Image: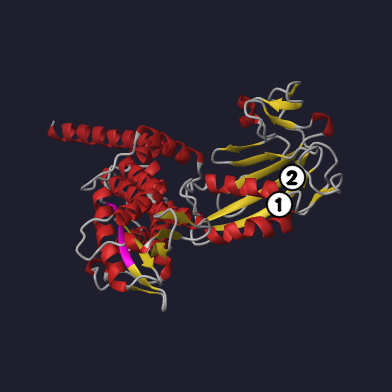
Amino acid sequence: MFPLRIAFETDDVPLHEVQNLLTITQHAIDDLNDFSAHHLRLLISDTQNGTVDESDFKDNKHMDKSSEDIALTVRLVAEASGSTPHAELQTYASILDVYFTSNQMPSPSSTSSPLATFIANELQKVFTEEQAALAFLLSANNVQSTKTKVPSSDVHKMLSRRMTRSFKYAPTYHLTFSLFAATGAPSSWDVESALQVYMAPLLESLAPISNFTVDTQLQLYASFSPSIRQPDFNTEHHAWTLRKEDLSGFINAAEWPLSPSIGVGPTINFILYVPASDQSPLQIEENGGNSWLVPQWGGIQILNPSTGFESASIASALSVDDLRKTMYTFSHQLLSLLGIPESPSSLPIRLSTLTRVRAAHLIFSASSTLGALARLTKTLPSISIPDTVAKATSQTLSHLHQACNDLKDGRFHSALGHARVAEAEAERAFFERSMVGQVYFPDEHKVAVYLPLLGPVAVPLTMAALKELKAIRQKRSLTGA
């Protein structure tokens, strides 16, 4: 269950009118919602002390009132005139501003209102992609709800592509930023300052979901992979072009130091390639672009000397200004590789959506791993279960239970934390070293291994036993005679 808390706040409208609008809007949202596992719950925000008035919403009385659990704040802004109602979603805050005139507020006896319907539709649009992503995840794991939402074929394809492109969730990712120059210049780049200015704020925003470690490197006289066709000069565009089918082979894995084992978690590579001046500008033939993604690996950006630099010192170094557009490109590529949805326009809402999706994904992953472990123990009843596996299994069940309760209560960051621990404990239980050995070497394999060794020992013993039996039989026959 994913109950999202939507807080309404205003300084210009009396409280009883806001409560009336809230009730009508809640009914409108419930009528629009076709996915029972994901529902919006409207509350009144007290802007003076930062709490939420939940007296009229008893089903939410157990919810945490911390501000981080408010999925969206709707600010009601009264205007004297103008084209109303209309709404504006802020890009860097979880705030939806709704502009209206006083005569658009519903009367106390109203059961419907154009303003309430407008707000309900706007809220539905904000969380449309999140609903589709969660419905896709639940259907992929054969989870049936009382009212299941089925994504359209286009949405299903889009979500499948995103899943294929993005990395599997990890508590920590390692980011490697590399500059490869085809010649001896530029021989330096102010990448640390550029990362601090352009990348650090984004990584800080992602910190509640995953941690990141960063390193950088530079290599001169780095030619791209010889396995692809060399760029062709396009006389129409006056540029050297790479074909789309060659982009996946652009990386020169034999010569470029791109180790996938650096750091604790998966490594995400970001490559800035500066071609030689006699092969510039270099761009993609099909669309004229100069950047692309490599699914589950990283992103590549080509910086052409003739058009990409802004400072005068382009021959030997890249300044922070020179790297500005590149860092924006890398930021966008990082969001894509982490599986962050493309809508709505508000980045904090997209990040909170990722929190809920990742929490659900980890719950399914831990449950699946635990189910596989249970089936394994039933298939191999002779296998011994170490105490460490029993403890890890117990921890997994406990954290899964807590994660589901947190989701139900709307504490999504806490749910992600418990789901993360559950998934790690389930993996630890399943890949316990002593159990893995028993799985790959059952009793039948042990017999097959030790039987050839027992053969040389058994043959002399068997022959001696036969001789003794023969001697006893002869002795009996002589005695009887």
Q: As displayed, is residue 21 above or below residue 54?
A: above
Residue annotated with mark 2 = 179
User: What quarter of the picture does the N terminus occupy?
Assistant: bottom left
Image quarter for residue 455?
top left
Q: CA distance from mark 1 to mark 2?
A: 8 Å
Q: Tell me the residue at 68%/42% (across/down).
A: 271
In the picture provided, is 155 more to the left or to the right than 337? left
Amino acid carrying label 2: it is Leu
Is residue 212 among the parts visible in the rendering?
A: yes
User: Could you say where residue 63 lies in the image, as x and y percent from the top left?
Assistant: 31, 69
Image quarter for residue 277?
top right
Please state the total of marks drawn on the protein image: 2
Q: Secondary structure at mark 2?
A: strand
Tell me, what colour scheme is on the image? secondary structure
Residue annotated with mark 1 = 216
User: Could you say where residue 318 lies in the image, as x and y percent from the top left?
Assistant: 79, 49
Q: Tell me the residue at 76%/37% (across/down).
A: 304
In the picture provided, is 284 more to the left or to the right than 94? right
What is the span of residues highlighted in magenta in the rendered image? 37-43
Q: As displayed, is residue 227 above or below residue 427?
A: above
Q: Is residue 20 magenta?
A: no
Out of 194 and 111, give the one closest to the viewer.
111
In the picture provided, is 39 more to the left or to the right than 199? left
Q: Tell me the residue at 75%/27% (across/down).
A: 239
Amino acid carrying label 1: it is Thr
User: What quarter of the picture does the C terminus occupy?
Assistant: top left
User: Could you say where residue 226 lies in the image, as x and y percent from the top left?
Assistant: 72, 27
Image quarter for residue 380?
top left
- Confirm or deny contact between disc 1 and disc 2 (CB under 8 A): yes
